[in-house]
Image (cartoon, rainbow, N blue to C red):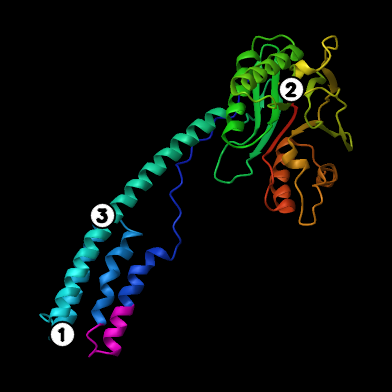
Amino acid sequence: MPTAPRPPRPAAPQPEVPRWVPWLPAILLVLDLIAEAVVPQAVAAGFLLTALPVVAAFSYGPVLTAVTTVGSLALQLLLALRMEHISEQHHVWVYITTLVSGVMGTALSWQRTRQNRNLIQARTVAETLQRTVLRPVPERTGGLRLSGLYRPAQADVLVGGDLYEVCDTRFGARVLLGDVRGKGLGAVRTVADVLGAFRAAAYDTPGLVELADQLDRAVLRAAADRGDDELFVTAVLLQYRPGSDCVEIVNRGHTRPLLLGGGGISPVSCADELPLGLGHLGPADERSKAIAVALPPGHTVLLYTDGVSEARDTTGAFYPLAPRLAALGSTAPDRVVSFLAQDVHRYAGLLADDLAVLALTPDAP
């Protein structure tokens, strides 16, 4: 099945600099010229230019900073020559101070430029690795139309503790969406482990329950390697065979999916299962089963993490997901996800947790 092309990776963002900072050298120069015009007899008029190279170093490269130094010295000499003070001792010391300031400013600018270049390179590598962990959601795969949204709570990262993946296998389209306990780099590492295990097993494991069991063991191994007995991942797995009128769902301690369509919105009834990594704590003689959920054309299954359902407004009220979607009046996956991308942000302002959403519906024949 054709899938949406992967969007080009954007360039790493440049370190942010306030807009007014590049204007500081010009402002300082104007102030000096105004002082020279207002009080022409004041010998201190050109003294303001002493700081100009250092100020320029915060905004411009070493070459331009060196040019600024030469320009400052030239302007000081002209101002002093105009007042016939060019060889006076205090002016000579001003020239020397400006030269030293220029050398220091040029060195500072070189070091700042070098650090920025290293920072951009590090960000580029980090973005590449993070985009390898979480791949773009295809628009169509395995007889499904899909749309997805991923928004970490931290604005400066691309991957948080939520995860998703879509695979088109010989058993049908298989979808995983989950939430790792914890935050930070440890959670990102677990995300990578679970997604790696899912991608390796989804193509060769016949049953959806067996696939969930493999992920459970993968999380258990990760917990043992890190010495973290409380590591677990809530997850929901879904499987759809092209042309079928239903989907199979296995829920491992995750928020229940929503079924949109038929004039209403209802949660999918799923058995209460332990999260991935904690399956060994349940009864050994009770084996879970996949739940078959009818999915006729025009109906959409919505998978989401608690970053949506637990988003709060300024009064502490939780985001009313079902009523908001009911007011939308559309079950198209792209419309649903686009609406949530804006509405949750307006409702909650700042997210308290990572947010992941997947909406899927049978593709039109």
If you read the primary sequence from the N terminus, does the residue marked by circle 2 or circle 1 appear first?
Answer: 1
User: Residue at 84% across / 19% down in the picture?
Assistant: 291
Which residue is label 1 attached to? 82
User: Residue at 31% across / 60% down in the picture?
Assistant: 57
* Residue 243 visible somewhere in the drawing: no
Q: Determine the secondary structure under disc 1.
A: helix
Point out which mark residue 237 bears: 2
Q: In this view of the protein, which residue sits in the foreground, 168 or 64?
A: 64
Query: How much space separates mark 2 and mark 1, taking CA atoms?
Result: 81 Å
Amino acid on which the number 1 mark rests in the picture:
Arg
Q: In this view of the protein, which residue sits in the foreground, 132 or 191?
A: 191
Q: Determine the secondary structure under disc 3.
A: helix
Query: How much space separates mark 3 and mark 1, taking CA atoms?
Result: 32 Å
Query: How much space separates mark 2 and mark 3, taking CA atoms?
Result: 56 Å
User: Residue at 57% across / 28% down in the picture?
Assistant: 189
Q: Determine the secondary structure under disc 2.
A: strand
Image: 5 above or below 32: above
Point out which mark residue 278 bears: none
User: Residue at 79% across / 21% down in the picture?
Assistant: 249
Q: Give the range drawn in magenta.
A: 31-44
If you read the primary sequence from the N terminus, does the residue marked by circle 3 or circle 1 appear first?
Answer: 1
Amino acid on which the number 3 mark rests in the picture:
Ala
Quarter where residue 190 is shown? top right
Point out which mark residue 107 bears: 3
Q: Single out the mark in the foreground, 2 or 3.
A: 3
